[in-house]
Image (cartoon, grey):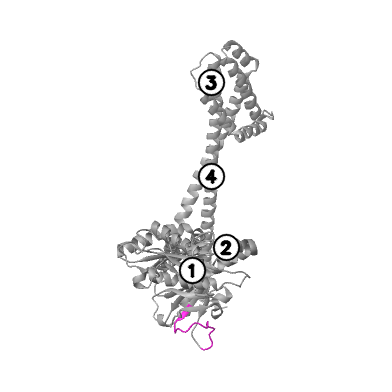
């Protein structure tokens, strides 16, 4: 058999590799073991620390209860000996401390039963002492101190207190022993944790790297949170400003400012729903490159967002589903606005360039929040306008009421005097209206009043104001209108009211009186009084006619400019 010294050589690489592998496995196992020790030591220490905290707090509460018992006993003894200087509040606080810690007294009972098998009830003893001491205090307050001390001896209060005190002392002694045990365990756990932390310190590098990545992610999340907080702040500010918006003009200004801050780089437009015309009317727009392409009005049937009640994006492309009214080259996000079950308008947000649709979809939540805030504002404005109309308008005729007339006419007259202009008043009274009500019923009378009011409004300019003065009387004041022009307008009104005859099987006519500042009157009170006097003059002269108030001295008369001598405009023969 041939042997050589080099025979084992071929096996060395394999043996070294096996050792490296085993060492690596051993290191991994050791690291795993160290991690396990660290975690175990951590949990062990943490549990003991928590237990130590609980023991410390439990002992403190038990000592408070013991001190409360001692304070209460001292107060009772002092009072029974005739000491009246001690405040009763100390006694009350002592028992309050005992009552609030009945769970500790119950824990004391369990401890005593476990020690010697007896079953003293600390809760019952405290209640018995409180009952006895209350009776003793009542006797002592009457000045019967000897009797109070006798009651204390009779009820064996001292023995009961001694029993409770010894129970407290035994419990706290045992409690302190447990406290010392847990303190020693914590020290042992700290040593294990310290040794394990030293051995696996190298792994902290990876922890730092992981922490850096987490910190970067947290910074990004915080930045996003800050952006969201800023956006919410802008929205709250918008809502607060909108609450002060008096009309659509104010609300539009707030919307434009807030949209510029929240969604800068996007244009927009607001359409407000017009109930009387069943259309959306352009109210405002901002940062819109193609504003000329915005229609002034939109019908509900032309808008997918309004028909669906959901946001809709008008995209570019031949196959894209777009609203009929959309003629702009810009992509548009449309958000329907509603509040309290009522359609209020449409908010449009525009974007252009590459990825416009995606950018619009990204700002949909913010745009919806803008729309919600504006919806509430428009609803509040509409509600305020409705309440204002209810306060200032007559519910039957729709004309302004007498209160509005009295507030406004004086303002019109003073403005006319300051600017050297004229203001005229026409007082209107339906002829034989009481007889019409008696013969045809009040429903017919109400209908005639409504139609007469509509006939009056139909002859007026936008600047003229018609009011219901009271009953069947109505009044119209006409700014920048001379007495002559007012007389012509009065004749038109008279003819229109007369044309209502026959519609309800009744003859309808009116008598009208006309006055003017400065031609016939010098102030608002004289103006109404002069028109009323002229009205009664028209009635006296046969009704269904127009009468003019007499011209003041020094003023140009109707005769010089075409006025009849008696100030009455007769009707044409039928």
Task: Tell me whether circle 2 and circle 1 mark residues in contact (CB < 8 Å).
Answer: no
**Comparing marks 1 and 3, which lies closer to the viewer?**
1
Residue closest to the eye, 470 or 498: 498
Q: Which residues are magenta?
A: 318-332
Q: Which mark is drawn over residue 75?
A: 3
Task: Tell me whether circle 4 and circle 2 mark residues in contact (CB < 8 Å).
Answer: no
**Residue denoted by label 2:** 433
Disc with the residue nearer the chain's start (1 vs 3) = 3
Disc with the residue nearer the chain's start (4 vs 1) = 4
| Residue 563 image offset from top left, x and y in percent | 39, 70
**Comparing marks 4 and 1, which lies closer to the viewer?**
1
**Residue denoted by label 1:** 545
Task: Tell me whether circle 3 and circle 2 mark residues in contact (CB < 8 Å).
Answer: no
Task: Please rate how many residues cluster around mark 4, counting C-alpha atoms within 10 Å: few if below 14, some from 14 to 19, many from 20.
Answer: few
**Residue denoted by label 4:** 50
Quadrant housing the C terminus: bottom right
Disc with the residue nearer the chain's start (4 vs 2) = 4
In the displayed structure image, the side of residue 195 where residue 121 appears, left or right? right
Disc with the residue nearer the chain's start (3 vs 2) = 3
Kindly state the secondary structure of the residue where label 3 is placed. helix
């Amino acid at each position: 058999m041939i042997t050589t010294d080099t025979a084992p050589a071929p096996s060395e690489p394999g043996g070294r590799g096996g050792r490296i592998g085993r060492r690596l496995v051993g290191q991994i196992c050791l690291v795993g073991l160290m991690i396990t020790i660290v975690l175990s030591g951590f949990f062990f220490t943490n549990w003991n620390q928590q237990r130590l905290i609980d023991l410390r707090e439990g002992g403190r509460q038990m000592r408070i209860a013991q001190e409360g018992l001692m304070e209460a006993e001292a107060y009772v003894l002092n009072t029974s000996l005739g000491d009246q200087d001690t405040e009763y509040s100390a006694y009350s606080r002592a028992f309050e401390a005992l009552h609030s810690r009945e769970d500790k007294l119950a824990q004391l009972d369990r401890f005593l039963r476990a020690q010697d098998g007896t079953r003293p009830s600390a809760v019952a003893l405290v209640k018995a002492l409180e009952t006895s001491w209350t009776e003793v205090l009542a006797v002592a307050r009457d000045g019967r101190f000897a009797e109070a001390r006798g009651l204390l001896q009779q009820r064996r209060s001292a023995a009961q207190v001694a029993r409770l005190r010894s129970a407290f002392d035994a419990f706290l002694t045992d409690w302190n022993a447990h406290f010392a045990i847990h303190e020693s365990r914590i020290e042992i756990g700290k040593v294990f944790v310290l040794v394990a932390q030293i051995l696996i310190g190298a792994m902290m590098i990876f922890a730092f790297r992981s922490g850096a990545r987490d910190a970067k992610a947290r910074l990004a999340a915080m930045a996003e949170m800050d952006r969201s907080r800023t956006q919410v702040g802008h929205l709250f500010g918008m809502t607060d400003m909108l609450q002060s918006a008096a009309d659509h003009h104010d609300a539009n200004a707030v919307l434009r400012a807030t949209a510029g801050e929240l969604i800068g780089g996007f244009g927009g437009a607001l359409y407000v729903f017009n109930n009387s015309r069943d259309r959306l009317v352009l109210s405002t727009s901002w940062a819109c490159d193609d504003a000329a392409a915005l229609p002034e009005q939109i019908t509900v049937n032309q808008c997918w967002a309004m028909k669906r009640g959901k946001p809709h994006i008008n995209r570019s492309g031949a196959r894209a589903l777009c609203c009929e009214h959309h003629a702009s080259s810009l992509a548009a996000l449309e958000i329907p606005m509603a509040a309290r079950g009522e359609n209020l308008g449409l908010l449009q947000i525009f974007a252009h360039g590459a990825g416009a649709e995606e950018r619009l979809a990204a700002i949909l939540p913010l745009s919806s929040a803008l729309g919600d805030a504006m919806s509430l504002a428009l609803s509040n404005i509409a509600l305020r306008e409705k309440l204002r109309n209810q306060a200032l308008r007559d519910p039957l005729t729709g004309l302004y009421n007498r209160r509005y007339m009295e507030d406004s006419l004086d303002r019109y007259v003073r403005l006319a005097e300051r600017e050297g202009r004229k203001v005229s008043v026409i007082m209107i009274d339906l002829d034989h209206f009481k007889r019409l009500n008696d013969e045809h019923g009040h429903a017919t009378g109400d209908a005639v009043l409504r139609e007469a009011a509509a006939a009056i409004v139909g002859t007026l300019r936008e600047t003229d104001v018609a009011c219901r003065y009271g009953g069947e009387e109505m009044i119209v004041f006409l700014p920048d209108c001379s007495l002559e022009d007012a007389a012509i307008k009065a004749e038109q009104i008279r003819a229109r009211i007369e044309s209502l005859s026959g519609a309800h099987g009744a003859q309808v006519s009116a008598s009208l009186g006309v006055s003017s500042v400065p031609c016939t009157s010098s102030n608002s009170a004289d103006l109404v009084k002069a028109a009323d006097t002229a009205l009664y003059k028209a009635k006296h002269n046969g009704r269904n006619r127009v009468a003019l108030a007499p011209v003041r001295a020094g003023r140009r008369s109707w005769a010089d400019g075409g006025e009849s001598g008696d100030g009455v405009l007769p009707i044409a023969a039928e």
